[in-house]
Image: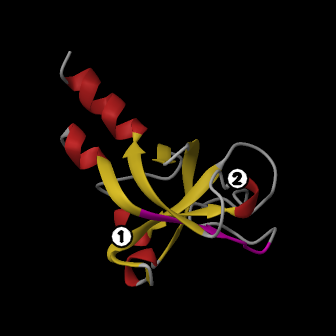
Amino acid sequence: MGISQAIIIGIATMYIGVVGSPLYCDNNGTVKYCNEGLPWVALPVDKYGEWAECGGEIVLYGDGWSILAQALDAGPLSEYYIEDFPELMIIADVPRIHSPFKGLSSKARMINVTRAKERMEKER
């Protein structure tokens, strides 16, 4: 994967989940929706595998905001869009407690920091 493939442009949305419910990356019963700890985000389920891995570092940034978070959850985000921007897919859901933008959604760029670091290491 090239560096340009590590960047995705779209919409980030804020969501509220059920505290204590398991996240996509809950493979041993310990990764749950919580309002504590390091920031985390949900990615489109189809981004896991080649583009991202559970626990990978993700940077989301937009106009005047940014967040460094772990990829821990997933959903069918690619199936939805925001009415004001139907040409842009939803690239991340950010739990309300970690949401760095105002409102329910924001245009965003998403960088897979883990993949970018791996690529840079290979090029050394």
Residue 48 on image: x %, y %: 39, 61
Callout in the foreground (2, 1): 2
Q: In the rendered view of the protein, which quadrant contains the N terminus?
A: top left
Say which residue appears at 25% left-offset and 31% top-offset: 119
Say which residue appears at 41% left-offset and 37% top-offset: 113
> Residue 16 lies in what quarter of the image?
bottom right
Q: Which residues are magenta?
A: 11-18
Residue 46, numbered label: 1
Mark 1 residue crowding within 10 angstroms, few (<14) / some (14–19) / many (20+): some
Q: Is 58 located above or below residue 28 in the figure?
A: above
Residue 28 on image: x %, y %: 66, 59
Mark 2 sits on what residue? 98
**Badge 2 or badge 1: first in the primary sequence:** 1
User: Which one is in front, 18 or 16?
Assistant: 16
Q: Is 35 located above or below residue 21 in the figure?
A: above
Residue 48 shows up from this direction = no
Q: Secondary structure at mark 1?
A: helix
